[in-house]
Image (cartoon, rainbow, N blue to C red):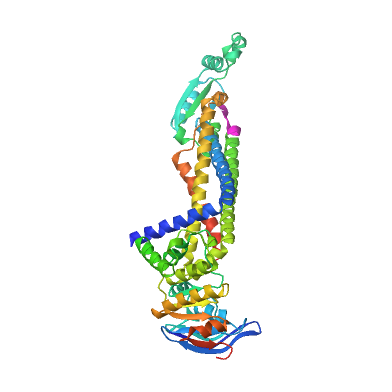
Amino acid sequence: MIEFSHVYKNYDKNYILRDLNFTVDKGEFIFITGPSGAGKTTTLKMLTALEKPTHGAVRFLGTELQDLKPREIPFLRRKIGFVFQDFKLLPNRTVFQNVALGLEVSGIFGNIITKNVSEILKAVELYTKKDEFPLSLSGGEQQRTAIARALVQNPQVLLADEPTGNLDEETSGIIIDIIKSFNNKGTTVMLATHDKHLIANMGRARVIDITKS
Amino acid sequence: MISQRVNYFLNYFKIAVLNIKSNISGNIFAFLIMSFSFFIMLFFLLCYINIYNYMNIFQKSNVMIVFLKNKNNSDKKNVLNFIEGLNGVKKALYYNDKSSMKFLEKKVKHLKSILKDANPDNFPAFIKINFKKNAVSSIFLSNIYLRVKSMKGVKLVYYNKMLQDKIVQFMFFTKVIGLILFIFLFILSIFISYSAIKLVILRKQNEIEILKLIGATNNYVRIPMFIEGEIGTILSFSVSIFLLFAIYKIFIFYRFDSFLKFFHIKIIFLNPVQIALVFLIAVVSGIAGTYMSSKKFF
């Protein structure tokens, strides 16, 4: 499903990634690990065409992402949900509207939005807060909103960049449980973290250390 | 397919309204400047149309006077026949010395007391030519002037050539100034739209980034901005045309135009085609401003 083949990435003379090679199959749960600055975020960004490799190839569903035309990129991103450490929610929209955005950009409107958004908000236990604005929510609730937004499009892959980085241990556990539950339903997950406890508590998951791959 | 497009449009419209609400002070500022700009544009057009109409009426009601050398009947007939045979001549009237004096008395009433002792024999015989309105042009009159002047028995041909030239010059001048002002105001309104939308983009850069991350196309981000720009433009235009019409009505209602009646000037308001033209310019400036500002970022 996902393939990194001899991927190099450098900014000027500073190499972030050197000969990165790995593959991910459908339904897998992958931890991308490595110290700060090792290129975890860059690796995830390459999958959404936010970054291009300096050398090598990144393939998603058989397509080489560096060959995508700019107008094809939005359609790639609709197949990939992205969750960020800093949530990236729109402050002037309610929880419901933030989640609905994921469907609206794909051209889905009306009753389907109401049905799908309500379902996903129930799944992340935020339905009762659907009319609240992000700034009135806790960090954990904001991250659950971000996860709901990423998953409402029913993506094939969920990318999570340090999703628990700003959260306490208990809230982190809740977030990971939610992500795990979607993985159990078949969504492929790639989660970048340097939190060894998180990896240790996960159990069935593959770990890719990008400094060693 | 159509309902999908309607849904898209409604969603874009909703986002545009949200954008306007979230930057209300910036939008009010842009709206005021644009209203002022369109008002100046419309006001100038109103002035220009009225001046142009007046000059056109004046230009087209031209009269030529042909003074004859003597009261010889054959010369008079020759000249009169020639003039009547010209295309564009509506009427040619001969005035002998007596009717010439009466003509003067009628036209210059305050000279009546002086003229009553004058000898009619001293007055020249002349032919007054009235031209058809649609036939008169500067070149046409010059041509007639030269042909009649060269005829036997003609002493002097008079028509208001200088005034004619001045009118042509003045109309050319107003056209040039009008065009320059129009271009300036058009560029100004593009710049205002450009700045207003650029501010929105700068303020919403984070939001745009998020939208693009979750799969929004450039159009999804850009179309609400176009709608926002057009809402601002249409509102500004509506306010400026309403304001101009209100001023025009007040002007007419309180008879401020009565002094202009002395010059036979009747103030008219812009017709629907002229209003539509400025509206089109306003819409184009809104689209151009938004396009330029968004192109820089996408």
Viewer can see residue B194: yes
Whole-percent x and y of residue B45? 54, 40
Q: Residue furthest front?
A: A170
Q: Which residues are magenta?
A: B154-163
Whole-percent x and y of residue A13? 66, 84
| Main SS, magenta residues | strand
Q: Residue furthest right?
A: A13
Question: Which quadrant is the C terminus of chain A positioned in?
Answer: bottom right
The relative height of residue A168 versus residue B137 in the rendered view (above or below) is below
Is residue B160 located in the magenta-colored stretch of the structure?
yes
Whole-percent x and y of residue A18? 59, 89
Whole-percent x and y of residue B193? 56, 53
Is residue A34 located in the magenta-colored stretch of the structure?
no
* Number of on-image labels: 0
Q: Residue at x 50, y 46 (%)?
A: B235
Image side of residue A156 versus residue B209, left or right: left
Frontmost residue, A155 versus B291: A155
Question: Which quadrant is the N terminus of chain A positioned in?
Answer: bottom left
Viewer can see residue B144: no
Q: Residue at x 51, y 33 (%)?
A: B246
The relative height of residue A133 versus residue B125 in the rendered view (above or below) is below
The relative height of residue B270 versus residue A61 in the rendered view (above or below) is above
The relative height of residue B23 versus residue A3 in the rendered view (above or below) is above
Frontmost residue, A163 versus A41: A163
